[in-house]
Amino acid sequence: MGSAVNRQLDRDVLLLGFSGLVVIAAWRMVTGCPTCTKVGERAAVAKPGSAVTATQVIMDLGTVLLVVVVGSAVGFLTGLFGVGGGFVIVPALALVLKLLGC
């Protein structure tokens, strides 16, 4: 679906959209997940009694639907911009699905 929309849009619009998405993804990774940065890591380690703990993901219907929606959005954006999905999947995993300890 994303690649079909890609063919209908002007290249300048696609480039502007892609650059905006990259800036938003970078900003959200820095501000939305402070423990994912070195500054956040140092602050978390400096707290007395803090420890790294594993989180358990419960796969209920809401979680499954969220994974499907986020995966579909990542796939759409990948097709739309014609690039690999790595620049979107990491923020999606960390911020939306909370799979990277954030």
Image (tube, helix red, strand yellow):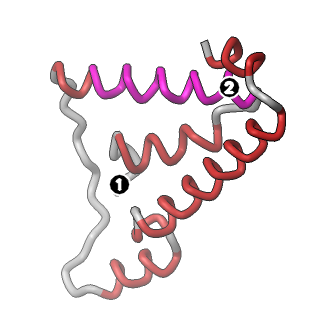
Q: Earlier in the sequence, mark 2 or mark 1?
A: 2
Residue 51: which quarter of the image?
bottom left
Q: What amino acid is labelled 1 in the image? A: Gly
Q: Are marks 2 and 1 in contact (CB under 8 Å)?
A: no
- The residue type indicated by label 2 comes to Leu
Give the foreground label among 2 and 1: 2
* Numbered marks: total: 2
Q: Position of residue 91 (x, y in %)?
A: 50, 48
Dot 1 alpha-carbon crowd within 10 angstroms: few under 14, some 14 to 19, many 20 or more: some
Along the viewing direction, whichever of 18 and 97 lies nearer the viewer:
18
Which residue bears the numbered disc 2? 80
Q: Is residue 76 left or right of residue 101?
A: right
In the picture, the disc for residue 85 is none
Q: In the image, is residue 39 part of the stretch drawn in magenta? A: no
Along the line of sight, which residue is nearer the eye, 77 or 65?
77
Q: How far across and down, in percent of the image, does residue 93 sit?
A: 44, 41
Does dot 2 land on a helix, a strand or a loop? Answer: helix
The answer to whether residue 79 is above or below residue 27 is above
Magenta region, residue range: 65-81
Check the image and report above or below for 96 versus 81: below
Q: Decide: is 45 above or below 71.
A: below
Please name the residue shown 50% across and 70% down the image.
37
Q: 10 Å neighbourhood of mark 2: few (<14), some, or many (≥20)?
A: many
Q: Relative to 16, is 64 above or below?
A: above
In the current view of this chain or complex, which residue is farthest to the right? 11
Left or right side of 35 for 11: right
| Secondary structure of residue under mark 1 | loop
Query: Residue 101 — which label?
Result: 1
